Image (cartoon, helix red, strand yellow):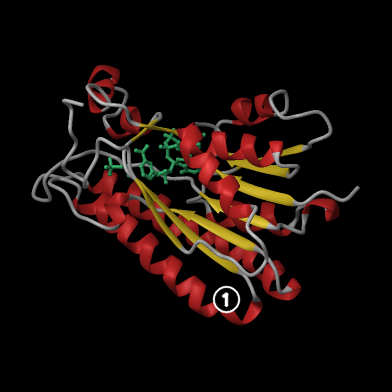
Amino acid sequence: MERKIAMVTGATSGIGKACALILAKNGFNIIATGRRAERLDALKNEVPEGIEVLPLVFDVRDKESVFKLIENLPDNWKKIDVLLNNAGNAHGLDPIQTGSLDDWDAMMDINVKGLLYVSKAVIPGMTERKSGTIINIGSIAGKEVYPNGNVYCGSKHAVDAITKGMRIDLNPFGIKVIAIHPGLVETEFSVVRFKGDEEKADKVYQGFDPLLAQDIAEIVEFCVNRPAHVVLADIVVLPTAQASATIVNKNL
Ligand code: NDP
Ligand code: 8X3
């Protein structure tokens, strides 16, 4: 039986991992990407029997590796039905006047250019077959700007705009293009943002019920199971306690 194939970037953790597992549960073979090879390998033991996982280890910033690995996929892995562009993070939370150039480079290079590189490598197969689904993980930070969010918000506003551009340009090919913009999801995101400071990271999610990676995965599951004529184009999902990027009710 020929299974559909989903490529999930950033499948080593958080939203990407939960999405890879739910897509596997829905019968997809999974191309799982990220930098931490051992975590990608471990996914093989977590998917249902009969589902295959192909780990592809690369940094999305490494243009050469992205194209080399995706263009040279084994024949039975070439037909990617679903591309989930999820790899990304915030680096730092500083005012623009004191922000770090390295952090800015990381966010623009990973969240924006990395998403573009992977998409550029995968899209030709989809346009040729005139089918496919691309799901980009944006953020509430792509819809609003919050204090000290400057460059991260900029990177996610870029994801929002690029997604809309993809939807227009890929419309003649019948390719579905979807953006999911989550609010606060408890993952390793804040540990990365605060450079390993777990105490500071934990505080972000204290006093209310944040979203879980599984909540986003269930939305992805719903999106990929819509009939051919239906696309959920642009989805904002927040914890019930969150009203905007900056308003979170911690008294619920
Ligand atoms: P995690 O830190 O848990 O996961 C981030 C994933 O991205 C990891 O799998 C990581 O893999 C991968 N990644 C990061 N940098 C690179 C890189 N240079 N090359 C390849 N892969 C990379 O965070 P989340 O699951 O929360 O984040 C996933 C996405 O969701 C991001 O785009 C984030 O901006 C977005 N998001 C998160 C929200 C939240 O509150 N958590 C809310 C809204 C959006 P590895 O380190 O192994 O390479
Ligand atoms: C992640 C959510 O609010 O930290 O994109 O920017 S937030």
Name the residue furthest left: 97
Name the residue furthest bottom: 172
Name the residue furthest right: 1
| Left or right of 125, for residue 177 | left
Dividing the picture into quadrants, the one containing residue 108 is bottom left
Image coordinates for residue 220, horizontal then vertical, percent? 55, 47
Taking depth in this image into account, of 235 and 117 the one nearest to the observer is 235
Q: Is residue 109 visible?
A: yes
| Left or right of 222, for residue 86 | left
Image coordinates for residue 140, horizontal then vertical, percent? 30, 50
* Quadrant of the displayed image that contains ligand 1: top left
Kindly identify the residue that appears in the image at 71 percent across and 67 percent down: 125
Q: Amino acid at mark 1?
A: Leu
Q: Quadrant of the C terminus?
A: top left
| Residue bearing the label numbered 1 | 170
Kindly identify the residue that appears in the image at 66 percent across and 62 percent down: 227
Instruction: Tell whether circle 1 marks a residue whose Cβ is less than 8 angstroms from ligand 1.
Output: no
The vertical placement of 18 against 165, above or below, is above
Name the residue furthest front: 252
Taking depth in this image into account, of 189 and 132 the one nearest to the observer is 132
Dividing the picture into quadrants, the one containing residue 250 is top left
Q: Is residue 55 visible?
A: no
Dividing the picture into quadrants, the one containing residue 242 is top left
| Left or right of 175, for residue 167 | left
Identify the secondary structure beneath mark 1.
Answer: loop
Image coordinates for residue 164, horizontal then vertical, percent? 43, 71
Q: Give the class, few, some or many, for how many residues have Cα within 10 Å of label 1's Cα (few <14, many ≥20).
A: some
Kindly identify the residue that appears in the image at 50 percent across and 31 percent down: 13
Image coordinates for residue 70, horizontal then vertical, percent? 68, 55
Kindly identify the residue that appears in the image at 20 percent across and 47 percent down: 149
Taking depth in this image into account, of 83 and 61 the one nearest to the observer is 83
